[in-house]
Structure formats: structure tokens, C-alpha cells
Image (tube, grey):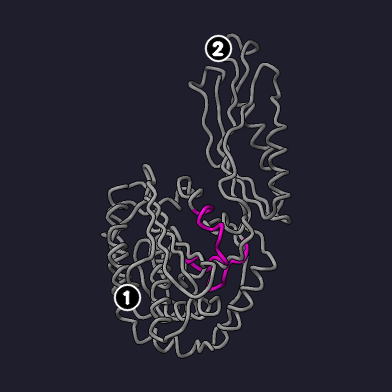
Amino acid sequence: MTDPKALLDWVTEQREDMLADLRTYVELESPSSDKESLNATLAWLDSWLEERLGEAERIRRVDGGGRGDIEVRDYPGHGDKPVLVLCHYDTVWPLGTLAEIPFRIEGDRGTGPGIFDMKSGLVHAVWALKALSAAGLERPPIRLLLNGDEETGSLSSRPVIEEVAADAAAALVFEASADGAIKTARKGVGIFRVDATGVEAHAGLDPAKGCSAIDEIARVVLHLHGLTDPGKGTTVNVGVLDGGTRTNVTAGKAGAQLDVRVASQGEADRIDRALAALRPHDARATLTVSGAWNRPVMERSETTFGLYERARTLAAEIGLDLRECSVGGASDGNFVAALGLPVLDGFGAVGDGAHARHEHISVQGMLERTALAAAVLHALS
């Protein structure tokens, strides 16, 4: 039987070693747009993982193109199906941020670029596996995926994630928690663009001869924002507009970039129909829609809820009230949940400030989540 309290005691004894690992990792800056830095970070991760976990049974590396490579590492365990552990090592922070926001531990608070989203999470996962080894407890086969392009939409990594998830029993995503809560549902995300083409003309001399693309886009924006339905968890936000050339020229081109978040596939279908039905106000204009759904909806399934209930019971044994929640942000967990696997997301840091300069973690939260991850992994064996 698992003793989560004993696991927490052991993890707590490793606090300084865990923080040393975290420091080294955070101080390796790894912006999504810098291939050289991403390669250097992955090289360190390879040596660190071998030191902490031993040699993997199999290692597969997939070229990420201009972004970070994707690496899949399989470790042996008890059972027929692996548990997929999802982590990403890219961050949103540009090179040089470390000088402005250095790694620092002050009491229970740890800071540094990427510490919350999501470098602390990988440290949790690795030390959870070490805790099981130290306690002599079984673990399932582990399939660890390190993603180098998550923050830019997982365009290169998505097919790899879906492929390696196909035979998995479940997935734990070590993204940051939501104020300590596990994420059992996430919204689907669509990134789209609407382009309008009009007819250019002199705005003063020949206004009737012109057909304004900006006028068309303005109407489209109002229509699209009207598709927002908070009650159903749907938001449509036009965040970028462009168009026109000069104030005295009727605009011949204009465009709008929009972010769509939906909590159900039914709402995704509604948005698709609305985009397909867009028509210009002026017959001389044209409207063109491009883009796609970047991540499918991660709906709260019965199997995910069952896995959450097991985790909540184990958390209670170390004095934690493990809550669940649904969030508007997406992760690589969305891809796996869409395949029908039970997914617990947000197994990473307890803290706040994803993508913000006040990004931070709780050190005690790091210890508790590591012990909890160990207990859940043992239960899955």
C-alpha cells in the first residue's frame, strides 16, 4: 500500500537537491524562438535525466524545425500500458530575462523565468519517480515527453504527442496548477484570421467608386464578438487589426486576427458554422477565413473524474484538499484527452504568474506535489 505521508517525508529530506536541480534548469534560458538555447537546454536535460533516473529503455528525438525538438523517453515499470508524462521545456521569456528576474528562493517563494510555467513541473515528475525507487514501490511504465514548442502552439509536436499517447493508460501533465487545483477540463483554442478585400479609390474625389475593406472588417469584428457566450464558456476576441494605406484612400485590404475559446465540441461546431457563413456587406468586397483549431476541447470525462478522485483521496492522506477546475488556457493535455485518455493536468507548480513578471512557486507546494505525483503513479501501477 502507498503511504503518501512517508513519501512526503522522503521528498522533504531532498529539498535542497531538488532546489539545486530547479536552479540549474531555470538558469538555462529556453525561449521558444531560440533553437540554439533550446538545444542546449535539452542536452542538459538528457544528462540530468540519466543521472537522476538512469538509462531509458528507448529514446526518440524528433526535429522541431525552427522550434525545440521533441524527445520521448520510455522507462520500464509494472504493467502493460505506459503512463504518459507530458512536460514542455520552452518558455515565453526572451534571452536576457534571467538578468532581470534571477532565480531566487526567499522563504517559501521561488522566482525566475519559467519556474511556474513549467520548469518546476518536470522537477516534480523526476523526483516523484526517484521517491518511488527510494521507497521500493512499483511504478507503471513511464513515457516521458519533453516538448520544445508548446508555448507556440505545439505545431511540430502534436502528431508526436498523439502517436505516443495511442497505447497509454493515462496521462499526467505537469503544467502549473490553478491556485493548487488540478485541471480536469480545458477549453479548446482556435486561432483564425479574416481578410477583407475591397476596392481602392480616392476617398474625397470618388468615394462612391470605393469599397472599404476596413468597413467590412469593422462589421465582421462586431459580428464575431457577438458570438461570445459566457454561459456556454465561449469567448471570441479579435486581438489584432490591420488594413488600409492612407487616410485619403478607401482601404483595399484589411484583416482581423481572432482567438476563440470553447468549452465543448458543440460550441466549436457553432463557431465553425458562423465563420463559414460570413458574407460581405458590399457585394464588391470579398471575405476570406483562414486558420484552424489549435487545440481540441479537453472535456471532463468520467475516466478523468475517476482518476481525479483517486488523486484527491491520496492527497487527503498528506493533508491536502486537492480541488479540480476547468480553465480557459490550453495545453498538450488537450490532444491526449481528445483521444479518450483520462488526463490530470496541472500536476506541476503551486504558485502564480504564468507569462507574467511576478511568476513564482511555493517551495512547500513543490514538495507536496512531488509526493502526490509519486503516490498517484504508484496507484496507476
Q: Residue furthest front?
A: 80
Q: Residues within 10 Å of mark 2 (few under 14, many from 20)?
A: some
Question: 237 or 184: which is nearer to us?
Answer: 184
The kind of secondary structure element at disc 2 is loop
On the image, the x and y values in percent for residue 231 come to: 73, 56
Amino acid type at image mark 2: His
Location of residue 381 with respect to 208 vertically, above or below: below
Q: Are marks 1 and 2 in contact (CB under 8 Å)?
A: no
| Residue 174 horizontal/vertical position (percent) | 47, 66
Q: Which residues are magenta?
A: 161-185
Q: At x 51% / y 48%, what residue is drawn?
A: 159
Q: CA distance from mark 1 to mark 2?
A: 65 Å
Q: Tally the numbered discs.
A: 2
**In this figure, which residue is indicated by the disc labeled 2?**
202
99 sits to left or right of 207 = left
Labels 1 and 2: the sequence-earlier one: 1
Q: Residue 187, relative to residue 324: is it above or below?
A: above
Element assignment for label 1 = helix
For the residue pair 308 and 212, the one nearer the viewer reads as 308
Which residue corresponds to the image point at 61% horizontal and 14% vertical from the top-left? 210
- Between disc 1 and disc 2, the foreground one is 1
Marker disc for residue 206: none
Rendered-image quadrant of the N terminus? bottom right
Image position, residue 189 (x, y; %): 59, 49
How many C-alpha atoms fall within 10 Å of the one at disc 1: few (<14), some, or many (≥20)?
some
Q: Position of residue 190 (x, y in %)?
A: 59, 45
Corner quadrant of residue 315: bottom right
Give the residue displayed 48% in from the left and 45% down from the top. Answer: 155
Mark drawn on residue 19: 1
